Image (cartoon, rainbow, N blue to C red):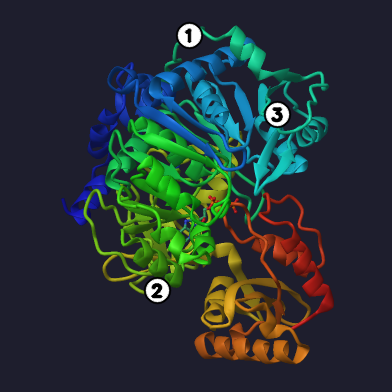
Amino acid sequence: MHYRDFHRESIANPDEFWRREAARIHWETPFDQVLDRSNPPFARWFCGGRTNLCFNAVDRHLAARAQQNALVYVSTETGIERRYTYADLHAEVNRMAAVMRSLGVGRGDRVLIYLPMIPEAVFAMLACARLGAIHSVVFGGFAAPSLAARIDDAKPALLVTADAGARGGKVIDYTPLVDEAMARAAHAPPKVLLIDRQLAPERLNAPYLVDYEPLREQHYDVQIPCEWLESNEPSYILYTSGTTGKPKGVQRDVGGYAVALAASMEYIFEGRAGDTMFTASDIGWVVGHSYIIYAPLLAGMTTVMYEGTPIRPDGGIWWRLVEQHRINLMFTAPTAIRVLKKQDPALLRAADLSSLRTLFLAGEPLDEPTAEWISEALDKPVVDNYWQTETGWPMLAIQRGVEALPPKLGSPGVPCYGYDLVLRSEHTGEPCAQGEKGVITLGYPLPPGCMQTVWGDDARFVKTYWESVPGQQVYSTFDWGVQDADGYVTILGRTDDVINVAGHRLGTREIEEAISSHAAVAEVAVVGVNDAVKGQAALAFVVLRDANAAASPADAQKLAAALAATVDRQLGAIGRPARVHFVPMLPKTRSGKLLRRAIAALAEGHEPGDLPTIEDASALLSIREAVSAGNG
Ligand code: ATP
Ligand code: MG
């Protein structure tokens, strides 16, 4: 099949296209309308059809693959390894659903899941789907104020948590965080279900805490039927990372999501029933929702869930997992690959990677040196794919299951079927010419699987996403891109990373790219801060390959001048940062996203406020120190 025809068909004739794809899942009641476009920019898919995500992910496979592994769990934090067949998974999900029901959870209720990477998190999400409850997974380890804000937005009937998470050998107690969030929240749920991993001291003293284990025993053989939901009822709420602002509660449907994920498994991931997929992400992110849990299970695959870091006990752990579990598909973020690149290459070569077909990377730009390194080291296709919490599945990728177009370094590929993706001028809203930088937009309707609305706030959905491009009712991704003659798009950064220096609009990412082309630079973040004269000024925070290169003030000054000269050459003097600070590391979320918002706040002397969990909080400290010392 030719990609071009396939894509064109999906845009010209979405009703026909998605009617065909809908046959991938079980419909208890068939839908009577593929697409309802009566209320743009809202779209309703598979209207009148009744289905259930849990049924499609679990029950449906019992006939053919009850004894196949559905979930393989590996924790290098606790040393625990468990395997659940589809029959086991079915039993555990029933137990969890029965316990939730006994605590009053029913159709349409929200359940906030604040759990580390443990199998119970999967059971809890699928149990919600089974009951028709709406899960809202909050990344485990989020600080109490962030958790409280999400509780107040979702108003859950139940919160599910664990005694502790673990990362890099360090135990993180969850219950004090939950206690504080419960106290802060105006809409605290009546009960908190506790999965006791016995990592933290017993703290079952709060009146709302309920221990899961005895309830599980009590409901061991209870069968809970799947609640048949109309395709457009909500399945979950997931808050965006909050890299750029107040997190938005992305709401997703049931039927459209199931169909979109099942289709993506064939056309983008080339995953087949019986395959094993390892998505090294967290259930708290959209990649975890879609590609640790729902998509591989919908497709009858085995999913590998991993708790731990990529370098503990050593940098070969992921490659050994591939060998041991005969993993066929692997999916992670470029940041993890950059970490692994610093490890001994012998660790990768020592593992038998013959089962692995493809590596998928998403979440942030895949820089060329990293792409080159990993493609060569693995000698397998590496598929960069671009999407957002809002879309639920890739917008840009080489869709190898449609046509294996050649990859181009620096680009995540071409628009995925279903997405009417157009680059538009931020001033006129008109489509850009080839090679011209523009905002990446999507035409109406968004394909199945994308967000339905912002939870509880239709007006914010319309205003935020559909009214930001002048003169057009199109969805804005808030990312910049440029498209070449073959349709390949390169991501140039986020629209809110633009700063205004003396009337010139500059993308911080372009300045970053110029700086990182200097051989001494390992990583860089550029942010804009208020400047009395110029409006804004660009500050660069640079991590050096060799920290000693800027050890003396004279060296630091020389290097800063060299970096400024590099920017002058590539962008012109207007892009030159007002100051260059050398820091040991940059603050990032656990999913590897640079926290420019926090860096900018610190650079202007404020506290960063509501933040996603930072991989290493001491990174903030070093930014603060660099700013107050005024080095560089
Ligand atoms: P918030 O919207 O709350 O600020 P966020 O945008 O960081 O948070 P996500 O939805 O997790 O939250 O991230 C999606 C964004 O990540 C995209 O809009 C894009 O900026 C970036 N991104 C994702 N994949 C890629 C990729 N393959 N290449 C470049 N950038 C990517
Ligand atoms: Mg975003």
Helix, strand or loop under label 1: loop
What is the number of the mark on residue 223?
1
Left or right, 325 with reference to 9: right
Q: Is residue 519 above or below residue 484?
A: below
- Identity of the amino acid at label 1? Gln
Instruction: State the residue in front, 584 or 385.
Output: 584
The picture places residue 232, in percent across and down from the top left corner, at 44, 28
Instruction: Say which residue label 2 marks.
Output: 436
Nearer the observer: mark 1 or 2; the answer is 1
Q: Which comes sooner in the sequence, label 1 or label 2?
A: 1
- Around disc 1, counting alpha carbons within 10 Å, would you say few (fewer than 14), some (14 to 19), or many (20 or more)? some
Residue at image coords 68%, 72%: 528
Q: Place residue 225 in its image quadrant.
A: top left
Q: Secondary structure at mark 3?
A: loop
Relative to 211, say whether 522 is above or below: below
Q: Amino acid at mark 3?
A: Gln
